Amino acid sequence: MMAEFTLKEHTADVAVEATGADLGATFAAVADGLTAAMCDDWPAADAPDGGERTEIRVVAESPEAVLYDYLDELIYERDVRAVLPVDNAASVEENGEWTVDGSYRAVPLSAVVARDVKAVTYSEMSLERVDGGWEAYVVFDV
């Protein structure tokens, strides 16, 4: 199963539906959906404003909580570091608590035209194992 996402119409918000072969691929696909909700187009990795690869780590008590915290961290990176997180990658581990080790390419916001996504929400969030992998649905406040 290839990791992929779809943006969904959702009243005044935007929702991302994503699938992946494992939790890491699914989380990265949701993060790519978040990026697509914020911006239609961004520079290629080899472009002058292509951005540098940046790593993040998030720990939480459940898979849903770590997904929420991971996405919240990406929004924080956008707001505080003024970068658009693109080309997301993630791995998820469970060892008594859930950990996401993620990375993204930090494209400067000055290089793109970006829309504001205010926050990730728990509203309607779902994360479940399906045949061939995982499926997630996340709503973002815009």
Image (spheres, helix red, strand yellow):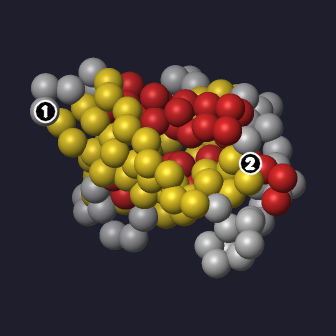
Disc 2 target residue: 38
Res 95 label: 1
Q: Position of residue 79 (x, y in %)?
A: 71, 33
* Residue at x 57%, y 60% (from the top left corner): 52
User: 90 or 63: nearer the eye?
Assistant: 90
Instruction: Give SS at disc 2.
Output: helix
Q: Residue furthest left?
A: 95
Q: For the N terminus, give its image quadrant.
A: bottom left
Q: Position of residue 129 (x, y in %)?
A: 27, 47
User: 26 or 48: nearer the eye?
Assistant: 48
Q: Position of residue 13 (x, y in %)?
A: 73, 34
- Does the image show residue 135? no
Instruction: Give SS at disc 1.
Output: loop
Q: For the C terminus, give its image quadrant.
A: top right
User: 66 or 135: nearer the eye?
Assistant: 66
Picture layout, residue 56 above or below residue 97: below
